[in-house]
Image (tube, grey):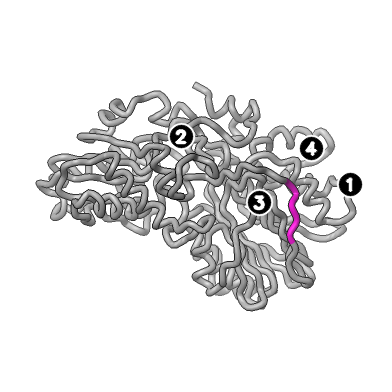
Amino acid sequence: MLAEIKGLNEECGVFGVWGHPDSAQLTYYGLHSLQHRGQEGTGIVVSDGDKLRVVKGEGLVSEIFTADVMEKIKGTSAVGHVRYATAGGGGYENVQPLLFHSQTGSLALAHNGNLVNANFLKHQLEGQGSIFQTSSDTEVLAHLIRRSGFSELKDQVKNALSMLKGAYAYLILTENELMVALDPHGLRPLSLACLGDAYVVASETCAFDVIGAEFIRDIRPGELLIINKDGITSEQFAFNSTKSICAMEYIYFSRPDSNIQGINVHTARKNMGKRLAVEAPIEADVVTGVPDSSISAAIGYAEVSGIPYEMGLIKNKYVGRTFIQPTQTLREQGVKMKLSAVRGVVEGKRVVMVDDSIVRGTTSKRIVSLLKEAGATEVHVVISSPPIKNPCFYGIDTSSKEELIASDKSVEEIRQLIGADSLTFLSTEGMVGAIVKTEGTNGFCLGCFTGNYPTEIYPDTLQYYYQK
């Protein structure tokens, strides 16, 4: 059971369209713009108003949805998903959206997040006769919906959602409507837009830009949107006063051109770099950022410090993110393949290397080595987030506590391990202030930094992530 928990962890992207004749094609473009959120599996479910059809597979969006495939899936509404899997969580059966059929109609689910009570609910449901076809926590919602005693789907969904704990942004598609739900803490980003008379929903606003959709608003925590031929209605299935969107969305996961809760990601990251320059003044010749998510922070650091920003590291864009590779061996090989230092920029220079985070330390150690091999006389590492000391239970693969380098090592010990001449992390207050320009930490989940989580964490989940 514990091994299964790890398999439930995934940082994903969801996209949905209602009321457009080219819904499948729009979903393809939307998923392509969300590809950074998951590169191991993707799927689209399309409705023509009569039946639902699914196409999905393991691979990139462009690999699964070829021109021939796109010609065969037509409809006026669709939901799509991109995902990555951690160890034990792969396989075609876990690729979303998940499609279910019953005598009363079909239902497709796409989910971003992680349910911390999934195993508890599975145990209960299996005791009542449910048989699960996947190891994904997403399937739990389908069983809860169908076992609800309510007659209307809206009430079935609201009742089922009230039983879930953790992070979830759900898209639920039937023949007749599209439902959109966000957990009571708003841990994952989810937004609504329009394209003419059609409605569009996506994990990030960058997906709206690529199809020309006009942003309307963010989905509220605990909100259920129902979109059908009669328009759009909103209901609250839960109320919570402590909104806790994941801070890592601003630090690492989201694209710089996305806006989350009205805050541009690039601007937030640049402000983090500016705060770093104040908190960690360094005498150096060059500032460089680790591509791609740290470039914005590096620009901000250079701007305030007065040290010129240079492209000291080059990324091979045909290699996926090392952070979301499923094994340590692949992560280490990925670092060697994906980055190279620019000798002409760093040779004979004191370099400030800006990165967004240190998780296991593997990547940082290799990049410091690359820069020194290219002739850098000093490498000073500055991180635009606090040390990650605790695992994430809400869908980001920050691994078990024992694998997090900052969980039991001091900053100085980490510096020695990665081979840097100095190492500085941005303070928690500095990070939050850089995002929202105000003091305090309300509105964010900072669990991986502080160990304070917005929801109850179930014992079997704790046992896995804190095992030694």
- Give the overall secondary structure of the magenta segment: strand
Q: Residue 376, position in %: x, y?
A: 15, 44
Q: Which circle's residue, 3 or 1, is located before the other in the chain?
A: 1
Residue 378 in which image quadrant:
top left
Q: Nearer the viewer, mark 3 or mark 1?
A: 3
Which amino acid type corresponds to the residue marked 4 in the rendered image? Leu
To which quarter of the image does residue 3 belong?
top right
Residue highlighted by disc 4:
125
Instruction: Identify residue for label 2.
Output: 449
Decide which of 424, 172 is in the foreground and name it.
424
* Boundaries of the magenta span: 234-238
| Label 2 to label 3: alpha-carbon separation | 23 Å
- The mark nearer the N terminus, 4 or 3, is 4
- Give the label on residue 149, or none: 1
Residue indicated by mark 3: 182
Specify few, some or many for label 1: CA neighbours under 10 Å numbering under 14, 14-19, or 20 or more: few
* Residue 341 as seen in the image, left or right of residue 334: left
SS label for mark 4 = helix
375 relative to 13, above or below: above
